[in-house]
Image (cartoon, grey):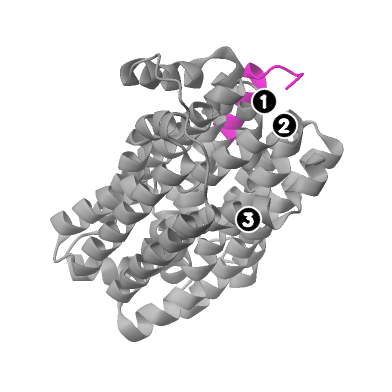
Amino acid sequence: MPDHARETSLAFAAPLVALAMGHVLSNMVRTLPAITADVLGADLGVTAQVLASLTGAFNMSFALAQVPIGVSLDRFGVRRVSLCLLAIAALGAALAAVAGGAIGFLLAQVVLGLGCAGMLICPITLAAKSLPPSRFGLWSGLIQTIGNCGMLLSASPLALLVDHAGWRAGYWTSAGTSLLVLGLVALLVHDRPSTDRSRSLGQEAGEVLRIAVSRPLRGAAILALGSFAAVLGVRGLWGGPWLMEVKFLSRVEAGNVLLLATTALVVGPLLWGIADRRIGHRRALLLFGHLGAAAALALVVMGGPGGPFGALPSAWDAAMLLVFGLLIAVQPLIFAIARSSVPTEQTGKAMSAVNLAFFGGAAVLQAASGPVVAQGGIGAGLLFFALATAAATILFFWLTPRAT
């Protein structure tokens, strides 16, 4: 069957959509603290800076899990790995819902990070192994588009749920979602694990790290370090406090603004995937998208109190965050560059290497943003992510061959 015909078949698309629903869950739980930061911090008895460190534990455990997940995907297959991870995610969400203090919430974030660690690369790996590299870019964007719907759920819908039932209800909802997706994956996903056992687990784990620092992937890994950190810095932590504490919006009003920005993060990956398939030039697309996103985030801060434009109305924040979401949504093409750089049997490891950079950078930069905010305010934290994204983009362009 021709590639274009197979891509439109239900047998091809249904397993990918089921796996992508796990990424919906992952995005929902990682961005939930942004819309609940004030009540969550007060209930746990921690400051905003401590809360940043607690939520950063999600990203750290997520990043540390990438190496074993990459090995497991190539060795045991997507189905087994995803079912195991979804069960762990359900446990983590339940632990967060019953957490009585900072230690309990920290444990929940660690477990959630482990469980969600493969929610993106499971469908990405299945698609990458099923398609030639030239047709993979569109599906990487489509999977991200589906997965980013989880951020839509943690905007206005969960803001209303939190106002009426408390932040714990958000995590109970996440636990139920985990079990629902687990059932869908068990029903729809069937793949064949590798039969090659010639190398030890230690050798395969080392291969993930070697791929991450190899010349073909080095620039992409550096870009990933700053790319997703900016998304989580805005959507997962400081976006809500900026709108509520600096721009004085209510929780639901702030949720509506974040909903608009998140809509861009949902639509954007698919648009960039179409652009990749039709015009190519992934390196140039990634450069344009990330530098533009960094500029849009800086413009958000410039429209705040004390900025060069003065305190602009919330419509300015909505517009700039919309632009930010559309442009930063180019990041799935980083996976496409990684896929084109390795043979098929190393696909899972290459996807994990990129994801390791995505979330390792997010964990480090999110934790580093806490002291920045303590010294300079929330605006300084947002500007910190804008500068980090711009610096990573410039290094990517320098290190990545023009032919990529």
Q: Amino acid at mark 1?
A: Ser
Q: Are marks 2 and 3 in contact (CB under 8 Å)?
A: no
Q: Is residue 229 magenta?
A: no
Q: Secondary structure at mark 3?
A: helix
Q: Is residue 395 magenta?
A: yes
x, y percent for residue 92: 27, 57
Q: Earlier in the sequence, mark 1 or mark 2?
A: 2
Q: Is 1 or 73 nearer to us in this picture?
A: 1
* Label 2 – label 3 distance at C-alpha: 20 Å
Question: Residue 26 shows which numbered tag?
Answer: none
Q: State which mark lies toward you, 1 or 2.
A: 2
Q: Is residue 86 visible?
A: yes
Q: Is 351 or 36 nearer to us in this picture?
A: 351
- Residue 63 occupies which quadrant of the picture? top left
Q: Residue at x 75, y 19 (%)?
A: 402
- Which quadrant would the N terminus be assigned to in this image? top right
Q: Earlier in the sequence, mark 3 or mark 1?
A: 3
Question: Residue 145 shows which numbered tag?
Answer: 3
- Find disc 2 in the rendering and name its residue: 132
> In this picture, which residue range is highlighted in magenta?
390-404
* Residue found farthest to the bottom: 164
- Find disc 1 in the rendering and name its residue: 340
* Label 3 – label 1 distance at C-alpha: 21 Å
x, y percent for residue 133: 71, 30
- Residue 316 occupies which quadrant of the picture? bottom right
Q: State which mark lies toward you, 3 or 1.
A: 1
* Label 1 – label 2 distance at C-alpha: 9 Å
In the displayed structure, 334 sits above or below 79; it is above
x, y percent for residue 109: 27, 53
Q: Amino acid at mark 3?
A: Thr
